[in-house]
Image (cartoon, rainbow, N blue to C red):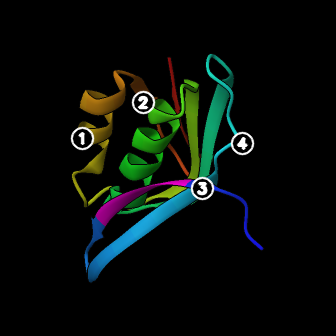
Amino acid sequence: MPYKTNGVSYQKEYGPDIIEMHADTIKPGEKVVIADDLLATGGTMLATIDLVKQMGGDIIGIEFIINLSFFVTIAAIRVTFGVSLSCGMVGRLFN
């Protein structure tokens, strides 16, 4: 049986979705780096940021392998997360 989870609903480009984590995954004040393979529209990344913050995590960085730069997600993540960006094939956002 699955353990108790925390979740965040968000909108993907093709419909609604929810991202969930076990309730005991992140302890308040724990440092977190979020990693994903692809940054496209940013919906999943923004939902993940929201979920980690709700759980009390201290996001110290965001990493992704590929950034589809023709989408305007970097600006949204900068505003939400307040970070600078260095990007190439591997993108990294760090506080």
Please report whichever mark, 2 or 4, sits nearer to the chain's N-terminal start.
Answer: 4
Dot in front, 1 or 3: 3
Q: Amino acid at mark 3?
A: Thr
Q: Are marks 1 and 3 in contact (CB under 8 Å)?
A: no
Q: Amino acid at mark 4?
A: Thr
The residue beneath circle 2 is 85
Image quadrant for the N terminus?
A: bottom right
Vertically, is 77 above or below 57?
A: below
The percent position of residue 13, horizontal first and vertical second, equals: 25, 75
Q: CA distance from mark 2 to mark 3?
A: 31 Å
Vertically, is 77 above or below 22?
A: above
Please report whichever mark, 1 or 4, sits nearer to the chain's N-terminal start.
Answer: 4
Where disc 4 sits, the SS reads loop
Q: Nearer the viewer, residue 89 or 85?
A: 85
Where disc 3 sits, the SS reads strand
Q: CA distance from mark 3 to mark 4?
A: 9 Å
Dot in front, 2 or 4: 4
Q: Which region of the structure is painted magenta?
A: 6-10
Dot in front, 3 or 4: 3
Please report whichever mark, 1 or 3, sits nearer to the chain's N-terminal start.
Answer: 3
Q: CA distance from mark 1 to mark 2?
A: 12 Å
Residue 59 belongs to the span the image colors magenta: no
Q: CA distance from mark 1 to mark 4?
A: 26 Å
Label of residue 5 in the image: 3
Q: Are marks 1 and 2 in contact (CB under 8 Å)?
A: no
| Residue drawn 68% across the image and 27% down it | 27
Q: Nearer the viewer, residue 12 or 93?
A: 12
The residue beneath circle 1 is 76
Label of residue 25 in the image: 4
